[in-house]
Image (tube, coloured by chain):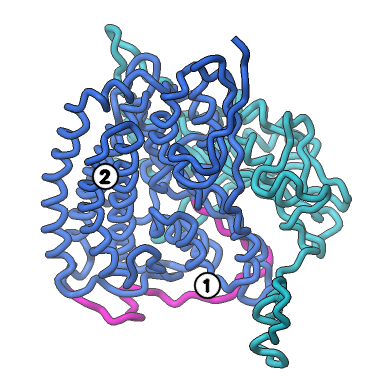
Chain colours: A blue, B cyan
Amino acid sequence: MAEMWISMGPQHPMTHGLWTLKIKVDGETVVDTEPDLGYIHRGVEKICEARDFTQITTYCDRLCYASANTWSHAYIYAAEDLLGVEVPERAEYIRLVAVELQRIASHLMWLGAYGPDIGNLSVMVWCLREREMMMDLLQELGGSRMHYNFPRIGGVKRDLPHGFAQRARAKLKLFLNRIQEYEALFDESTVFLVRSQGVGYAKPEEMINHGVSGPNLRAGGVNYDIRWAHPYSVYSELDWAPPVERSSIKGADCYDRYRVRVEEMRVSASLVLQALDKMPGGADTYHNPGDPMIIAKAPTRAPEGTTGAHHFEDSRGESMFYIAGGGESRGKQPYRVSIRSPMFITIPYAAKCMIGYKVADIPAIMGSFDPCIGETDR
Amino acid sequence: MGNTVSPDFQKAAAETLAVATSAIEGVDAEVIERSSGTSPRHVVLINASPGSWRALAENLYSEHAVDYCSMVTGIHWPEGDEERKWEVVYHLLRTGVRDPPIENGLVRPMIVNPSKLKGASMPLEIEIHVHIPDTTTPSVDSVQDIWVGADWNEKETWDLVGIDFDGHQEMRRVLQPHETPKGYHPLQKQHHLRYHGFEEMYDDAQGFMRKPADVGKIK
């Protein structure tokens, strides 16, 4: 049969954003793929070169609309390394609460979007209902619904508000019960199992060589996690382990990638609950903004020749910032900010994973890798 | 609680790697401390000449199990030293990830106990700086065939910064439009943003002849 190229996207439900997947098909079988990105490239790295260190946080929030807090925190850790700031321990616990709540919200957004991808429409409404609880908690911390601008160089913007710990505990308890509802909805749905099992196999060693990390890697049965291998913040103080899925012999399929994210939501909820219990000074006390318990004084200028780098476990894999300070001539602005987006590296690999499967499997495989085009194109 | 990798053991592994790689000609390695909030991380910082970079990369991959290319950063230093007009920074990780073993036709998940990690299985951060002297066509050797993860990183570095990678297959624009003029790489420092220096707040691209809001004011 004759082979031909077809463009899926830039407007297609499979893309979860704005990009084109060119596929070469032989009948119904995919024989070659080529991703084409860059439709919403905004030049964030260049914009950052003309902004103060404190102003860049807001741009990092907007890199990913589903996971704003993890991106602004990734930048803040690199900036603190550059400027040489020691962070108060209480601020680290508050950051951990914010990041892990954001991780749950991001995975819920993914789960809600993945259901309709492969024919399970009702799950979207259920997941967005629970995501709303996480958004409410994050709104109490950051003040807005999606782009929080919560961390500061040296600490956090505000302490936990009065009664936050009590509300967070109640909501997470309810949430942990409701995870079982999703599992029932997915694992007992024949449509879901038929479409997600046995497609999109990925082996761990191959994924590592292709630069794929995060939940997609852990679905293959290995416990590599940046929070575990290069512990930052206070992850080494808490009792947890990276969630791992028992994959099939051929590697991780779409079903394993769904399972590992559900497990990761449980781990994140447990981390938040532990952090609220172990927080120095207690979760129920309140400190005013600017108090040395929650924010340390930070210099605004980076000396000549200094650099800052930080690997961070984002909801989608390993994100990273590398910042070069420019000395006196640059004032309060960096010389170069470089951003590593996990999905920018993962999307070419996901496109390779599709080769050999049917055209109808493409939404199932692509969706299971959790693409986010805001961070991919930067 | 002992569930994560200990930075103290990482320091010893980093020092071993730094000593081993320093033996390569044109390579200079040391261990530095980077902060991560409250505790330090130990990173192997390597300075390599453009000629020795390819040999160093092959050595790291085959001898020291460095299996993951995290990020490639290109920097343009037009006012820098004569030896450093361009710079490529590689961030690599040693992850120690292996395919999990198969028992009785089933996969046994590979749960690594961090207290039993030693030698070449210890996760490690490696940062490599390659300085390129003054030239209009900067380039270094590609490592696309060693770490496939470097493939799109190198494409992006050429697209935005204009540093070419010798031996890279299929170099093309990835973030900018395909019809971008040849030789235009926006992260080079001769290209300025309109608001560099705050002289005007917005441009007049649409031709409305609007006056800048803060004309004559110095911010």
Q: Quadrant of residue A20?
A: top right
Asked if residue A25 is among those painted magenta in the image, a careful observer would answer no
At a point 31% along the width and 57% down the height, the residue shown is A96
What is the x, y in percent for residue A153?
A: 45, 70
Quadrant of the snapshot with the C terminus of chain B: bottom right
Who is closer to the viewer here, A85 or B105? Answer: B105
- Give left or right: position of A245 versus B67: left
- Above or below for A141 versus B199: above
Residue lying furthest bottom? B216
In the image, the segment drawn in magenta is: A285-310
* Residue type, mark 1 in image: Gln
Residue lying furthest top? B104
Q: Secondary structure at mark 1?
A: loop
What is the x, y in percent for residue B45?
A: 62, 47
- Give left or right: position of A143 versus B213: left
Does the image show residue B199? no
Q: What residue sits right under mark 1 in the picture?
A: A55
- Above or below for A139 versus B25: below
* The disc label shown at residue A222, or none: none
Q: What residue sits right under mark 2 in the picture?
A: A124
Who is closer to the viewer here, B145 or A324? Answer: B145
